Image (tube, rainbow, N blue to C red):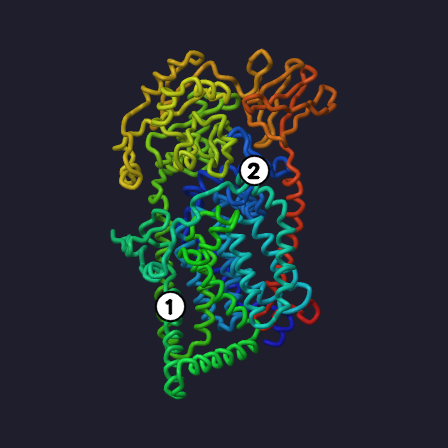
Amino acid sequence: MNERKKRLRLPEKGILLVILASVLYVALLAGGDPEVFLTDDNRTQWYPVMERAYEDFWTTGKIYCYDFYQMKGMPVAGQGYYGVMNPFLLLSYTVTKLLPGGMDAITCYIGMMVVLGNLFFYLTCRRLGCKEPLAHLMTLTYSTMGCFWAFFYWYYVFNNYFLVPFLVYVFLCCTQKGWLSYCACGIVLAMDLWMGNVQYTFYHYLLFGILCLAMMALKNMRYFKILTANAAVGVALSLPMFFLLLQTSGGFQKQEDFMKYPLLYFSLLIHSVIPQGILRQHGKGVSFLDSFVMRRDDNLVCYMGAVAILLFAVLFWTVVRFGKWVKKLGRETGAGPRAQLREIGAGCKAGYDRALAWSHEQKTVAGCVAALFFFLSLMSGGPAAHVLHITPVISNFRYLFKALFPAVPLAVMLLAYLLGRMRRFRAAALFLTVGYACVGVVNACDTVQQAHGLFDMRIEGTYAEEKEAALAALTEAGVDDKNYRTAAFLRFPGINDECFDISHNLTKNFATSVGAFSLAGYEIATPQSRLKPFDAIFSQTDFFTQYANADTLENFSHNLLNRPEIVQKQLIENGVRYLLLDKTTFEENRLAQEKAGDIGFFDRKDRREEVIAALQNLPDLRVERVVSFHERYDLVELTGVNSLCMDEAGGMVPLTDENMQTLSFTAKEAGDYILSFAWDSRLKAFATEADGEVKPLVVEETENGNIRIRTTGSAEKVTLTRYDPFCTAGFIWEGVTTLLFLGIFTICLLCTVRDTCISRKKVL
């Protein structure tokens, strides 16, 4: 039977068990909520854009890389921000549309990454010599790592969960010899950039580079060719995405966040074994050393169960044993320091010579050890962090602790390798691992269920119901969201009300989802030149304003009183007819009360009347009405502002949004038409005449940065859209890369735990 199984290359039953158990584990974490991972940034920042992009894809067959709804038009193809060109996200969206139950694409995506990550983590453990029970235990341990579940509201951190084990497995299977060794890892790294953001992709390139350097250090210089060839393949297959990232991120504009939030070794060691989830259920929590990550004082991000403590014990044992060997050597030789150093050097050389004869798997483990120490040095602010901090472009990455995401999979792999070979204390180590894996399951369940409370999410219905509520509120308030813009103003800086119930206002990117035009957008990724036309409406005074994509009433009032001419000009030119003024009191805002000490003094004055009075003093604008918009906002309607599309006489021309990247209107007569959208060199316009003839039109930039379209006839349908050659090339490159990736994926699935690769003699 075993010979027949080997001959037919049937998968072992453990693989099917891992897949089934992973699906059930995600279902356990979900607790019956189909939108369990749709919270905070996932809900308010990325999902509205990607959902609209995928809806347009199934309508038009194209994924659009530009969004007219936010920030007067903004590129959205960059993976670190919206992920609209991530093929796995598109697959997740498609699956959710086919399956009943109302699951959202991000929840499906995270579940998919967990299943695939567990699958290839299990295969890696088997490849490294673990028997099935131990491989299952280590896969369970991997599933409970706190860093992933503590930051699931950044859905793309789970790319590390899948891609790090997969990259190591591909390295194990496909880099010994043959043509696959020169492209397999490069294909994975190329797909990495199409799937994730550039920061994690760079970390994965570093991981691959360190693995190759370890091979070269062990005198396999062929890996220099493997390193350069795979890096070239990875860059070539993802080149269009790299240029799209440059566009979206404003050319990787200068950030000051790279060296923030270092995670010290001792803090990681201590907090890795604290059952924060269980303690919090009893109203308690433990945090030592005043350590926190991203203002989280629960330190669940550090939880690694028994992994950190066991690896530390092995490291401590190794150092002690080396020290004892050095002392013993000194006693036996009785030589002086120089002779003793020579003996130590000779002993090290003998160990190095033995390492040259290691198997491919053992050498890969050595590379994983080196990579783990590199990422630990990076996340703790050590030498690796200081080197990268002076590196152009890389220095603009955010937060040191993010190096933990690629480091954790390596740590669990190494523990699996050690436990597979451990003789002494094996039973105790396994018992400890089992115990902390069970604790980790409780921690993960608690973290997922508590996330809504962490961000004070006041979610009463599903995402679709929130959209319906927002559209109903806009209709009830008589908002013309197709021809004018809406801007929201928060009362407390740093307290982003769009994180609570996005049907209450139109900040962040929620306007895209409901098809309303606003000035909101992910501003910290936007060049300052794009913000300048409305910097008196949304003042760029601090990070919180940019992050929330809505100014505070205090700043807006200050600008109205001190720069009324500029505010009036910007309101008029940007077509901002509707203002949403936050009327939540400090006593009603629990999160404001909790964060008052962290953020500092809150301006508790209700400035709505002050703002309305200042607006009434503007000579060219008039406050038409003030009505209630939901229970936490007042809607102020202005008259005298320009519409989003106007003819030469200043009259409103009704605008139609065909999709997130295409606008159209009907020209009443030949002449110039002004559109209140940011001019972009890639914007194209064309006219469709009554007989169906299509002709290009001139798109010009006005003196205030808006768009002028010059028409030559009347009764023409004028269409404005954006053509980006990198986006067009991206679809081709992405398709090729996806097919190649699926090929590597299939080869790896066909690998067995005993063979290097399926049909090695023929393929490799």
Mark seen at residue 312: 1
Among the 4 quarters of the image, the one containing residue 453? top left
* Residue 676 visible in the snapshot: yes
Counting residues from the start of the chain, the first of labels 1 and 2 encountered is 2
- The spot of residue 518 in percent (x, y) is 48, 28
Mark seen at residue 3: none
Vertical arrangement, residue 701 with respect to residue 441, above or below: above
- The spot of residue 176 in percent (x, y) is 63, 69
- The spot of residue 256 in percent (x, y) is 43, 44
Query: Around disc 1, counting alpha carbons within 10 Å, would you say few (fewer than 14), some (14 to 19), or many (20 or more)?
Result: few
Screen quadrant of the C terminus:
bottom right
Query: Which residue is located at x 48 percent, y 53 percent?
Result: 388
Horizontal arrangement in the rendering, residue 667 relative to residue 313 (left or right):
right
The span from disc 1 to disc 2 (Cα, nearest Å) is 47 Å
- Residue in the foreground of this view, choosing between 677 and 400: 400
Query: Which residue is located at x 27 percent, y 55 percent?
Result: 286
